[in-house]
């Protein structure tokens, strides 16, 4: 008996030290002695998880939980693995069932919070991160997860305090500097100077300073140091490009393949051959280039009593990938479009709803706001004949500059790639206009900003919704926001970002030439 206890203790020490070979050895020995040992299966699951063998980890955690239904650790680990394989409703059900059992486990409170966030249930994530931090204060990873969750829940003062404390403890942590810079408008240069000093003393190569470059650029822009701000954005983009292994030609080829496959005949034949499933709820797909006002439109519409938002699920491209049978880590390619162009549209609708049903409430309309679904509007139109398709547009150079100064978009790390991608996107928008006709509802960001009430009336009418004054006060919408605009959308409507590109007119001249050579008008 003491031998078994020592074996288990050795395995647990190895888990803490991430010595996975010993964990695997201990698990195998426990299961050799007793094939029905829950701890053996649990430890084997941790070993499989560490090795990236998700499906085998699922089997082990499921077995551990079946043998001992009280194992909340196995339940949360299993939910984590379910979420990694798009089994989001199952992950949600597990977390709800075991959440009350986690109250004294900082490790699994924190992991459960991360899983809730991954499946889009941010309202349930925040209390778990807060409790984990209460039980085990001062752990940087737990503090950082609580801070990120607080931002999504508009608890900005708490997030600010957490990031400041994290930087007092770890002044060289670049990601925390970056997150702090996004939280507030810089009013002085103290943080900029601190970050510049860190660059000088760290001796790190450019590719390891990317977050710091973006953070310095953002705060210099706040301080209206336009030229210097752009120089740091350029450094960030150049450094990211050096390690991104990205070819914009592949994205352009994808867009060209979509235009070739999703033509008017294809759409008509698909509709005639088999009527896709109609949902009990009407989806509103909000699309467009990122940073063109998609989050703003989402907050306005989800303030309506008949509309809810399920956020950016990314489940349209993920479902298309699964239907194609091509292993591509959920990245759509031209080859995948070829494979799914002739797949029954109902399979997209049913597969999508299977993945997002845990997010749906009781309102008759729901928003899916993944901006880059603009690539897949043809598939969406076939799968949901009753869906509302809302496309956001913005001044091309404002849109491009807003993309360029973010860390998220590989096609925007260089002005040349960004120009090529924007031109391809613009061609695709013209294609959708010809294919989708009146089904495509377009909304200009600048019109919304400068004439909020009239634009909101027109938008609601286009979506067959009655006007409600709450839509004019979207900043009061309490729902979580997990987008790059999570701070901005808590503010009333303003025009601070309109025409901002003009402060960088000289630097953006090469990009402007690419756009204008393609016939794109700049105002």
Image (cartoon, grey):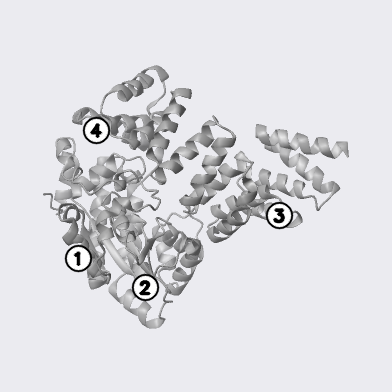
Residue at the disc numbered 1: 458
Please identify, in this view, whether the residue under mark 2 or under mark 1 is nearer the observer. 1
Residue 381 locus on image (x, y percent): 34, 70
Front: mark 2 or 4: 4
**What is the quadrant of residue 445 in the picture?**
bottom left
Q: Which labelled disc corresponds to residue 222?
A: 4
Give the structural element (helix, strand or loop) at label 2: helix
Disc number at residue 470? none
Q: Nearer the viewer, mark 3 or mark 1?
A: 1
Which one is in front, 447 or 507?
447
Considering the numbered disc 4 on the image, is that residue within a helix, a strand or a loop?
helix
Q: Earlier in the sequence, mark 2 or mark 1?
A: 2
Residues at badges 3 and 4 in contact (C-beta under 8 Å)?
Answer: no
Q: Is residue 345 above or below residue 420?
A: below
- The residue under label 3 is 65
Q: Residue furthest right?
A: 1
As helix, strand or loop, the secondary structure at mark 1 comes to helix
Q: Position of residue 273 (x, y in %)?
A: 40, 82
Residue position for label 2? 382
Left of 121 or right of it: where is 2? right
């Amino acid at each position: 008996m003491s031998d078994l206890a020592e074996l288990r203790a050795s395995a647990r020490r190895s888990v803490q030290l991430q010595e996975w070979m010993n964990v695997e050895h201990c698990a195998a020995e426990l299961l050799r002695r007793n094939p029905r040992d829950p701890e053996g299966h649990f430890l084997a699951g941790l070993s499989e998880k560490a090795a990236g063998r998700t499906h085998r980890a699922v089997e082990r955690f499921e077995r551990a939980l079946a043998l001992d239904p009280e194992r909340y650790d196995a339940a949360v680990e299993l939910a984590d693995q379910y979420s990694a394989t798009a089994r989001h409703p199952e992950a949600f059900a597990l977390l709800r069932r075991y959440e009350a059992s986690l109250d004294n486990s900082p490790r699994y409170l924190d992991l459960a919070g991360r899983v809730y966030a991954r499946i889009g249930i941010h309202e349930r994530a925040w209390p778990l991160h807060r409790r984990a931090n209460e039980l085990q204060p001062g752990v940087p990873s737990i503090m950082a997860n609580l801070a990120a969750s607080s931002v999504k829940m508009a608890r900005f003062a708490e997030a600010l305090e957490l990031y400041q404390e994290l930087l007092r403890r770890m002044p060289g942590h670049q990601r925390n500097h970056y997150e702090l810079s996004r939280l507030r408008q810089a009013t002085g240069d103290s943080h900029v100077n601190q970050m510049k000093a860190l660059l000088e003393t760290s001796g790190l190569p450019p590719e390891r300073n990317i977050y710091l470059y973006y953070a310095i650029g953002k705060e210099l822009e706040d301080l209206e140091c336009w030229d210097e701000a752009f120089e740091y954005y350029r450094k960030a983009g150049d450094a990211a490009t050096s390690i991104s292994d990205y070819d914009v030609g592949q994205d352009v080829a994808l867009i060209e393949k979509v235009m070739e496959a999703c033509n008017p005949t294809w759409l008509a034949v698909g509709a005639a051959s088999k009527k896709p499933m109609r949902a009990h709820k009407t989806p509103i797909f909000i699309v467009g280039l990122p940073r063109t006002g998609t989050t703003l439109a989402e907050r306005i519409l989800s303030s309506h009593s008949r509309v809810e938002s399920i956020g950016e699920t990314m489940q349209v491209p993920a479902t298309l990938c699964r239907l194609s049978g091509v292993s591509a880590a959920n990245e759509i390619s031209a080859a995948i479009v070829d494979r799914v162009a002739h797949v029954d549209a109902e399979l997209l609708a049913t597969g999508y709803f299977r993945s997002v049903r845990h997010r749906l409430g009781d309102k008759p309309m729901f928003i899916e706001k993944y901006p880059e679904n603009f690539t897949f509007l043809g598939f969406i139109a076939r799968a949901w004949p009753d869906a509302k398709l809302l496309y956001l547009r913005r001044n091309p150079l404002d849109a491009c500059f807003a993309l360029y100064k973010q860390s998220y978009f590989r096609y925007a790390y260089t002005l040349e790639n960004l120009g090529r991608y924007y031109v391809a996107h613009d061609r695709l928008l013209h294609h959708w206009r010809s294919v989708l006709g009146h089904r495509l509802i377009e909304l200009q960001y600048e019109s919304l900003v400068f004439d909020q009430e009239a634009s909101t009336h027109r938008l609601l009418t286009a979506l067959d919704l009655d006007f409600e004054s709450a839509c004019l006060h979207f900043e009061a919408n309490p729902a979580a926001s997990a987008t790059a605009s999570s701070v901005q959308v808590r503010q009333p409507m303003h025009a601070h970002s309109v025409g901002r590109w003009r402060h960088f007119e000289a630097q953006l001249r090469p990009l402007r030439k690419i756009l204008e050579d393609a016939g794109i008008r700049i105002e």
